[in-house]
Image: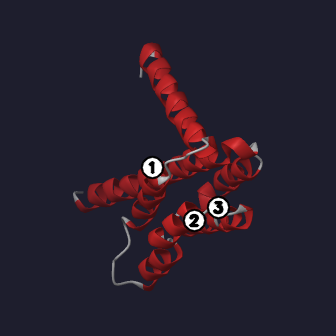
Amino acid sequence: MSALENQIKEMYQKAFYDIIDGTVSSDNPNYEWIVDLYAEIKQRLVRYIKKDSKTYKLIDEQFDIPLFKQMIENDVFNVDSLFKLINTTFYWIETLQAPARDHSTKEAKNRVLNAPQEKTVSTFIKEVNQCIDSLDEDFLNFIKSSNDTKNK
């Protein structure tokens, strides 16, 4: 990636996370976008899991999108709810990823937990998606390696 492409990507990402921060801190926030981003995280986590498996069902239960939406819309989603959501999400990332990623995932979780309150949601979305990107990369490398082995 060229320096210009990198700079454009960084500017785009900063704007994206600034919009999330603005949405969350607004006097009249539209949480639909946050709900959609949370649903996307869930979908990314279960993408490689068989739908009839116990793991899929557990993730599906723990990432209850309608409940999350109701809690946010009714202003009952509090610090404890957020802490539980953060822990649950990182638990599943750590469960699904290669053990070699555990340290970087713990660091990502700590960045979320230590983020300034007004940036917690954007930091959570950023860090979780980066961890899932690594999970995706590892999975694709595994598939490629398996295919290379079969073709020899």
- Tell me, yes or no, whether the two marked residues, 1 and 3, touch with CB atoms within 8 Å: no
Task: Using the image as rendered, state which of residue 74 and residue 39 is in the foreground.
Answer: 74
Q: Residue furthest front?
A: 28
Measured along the vertical axis of the image, is residue 87 above or below residue 21?
Answer: below
- Residue highlighted by disc 3: 86
- Residue highlighted by disc 1: 33
- Tell me, yes or no, whether the two marked residues, 2 and 1, touch with CB atoms within 8 Å: no
The image position of residue 42, as x and y in percent, is 45, 64
Which quadrant would the C terminus be assigned to in this image? Answer: bottom left
Check disc 1: other Cα within 10 Å, few if <14, some if 14-19, many if 20+.
Answer: few
Which dot marks residue 74? 2
Q: Residue at x 43, y 50 (%)?
A: 137
Question: Which element carries disc 1, helix, strand or loop?
Answer: helix
**Left-right relation of 93 to 80:** left
Q: Earlier in the sequence, mark 2 or mark 1?
A: 1
Question: Which element carries disc 3, helix, strand or loop?
Answer: helix
What's the distance in space between the residues labelled 1 and 3, CA to CA?
18 Å
Foreground label between 2 and 3: 2
Check disc 3: other Cα within 10 Å, few if <14, some if 14-19, many if 20+.
Answer: some
Q: Residue at x 48, y 75 (%)?
A: 59
Kindly identify the amino acid type of the residue bearing the numbered disc 1: Trp
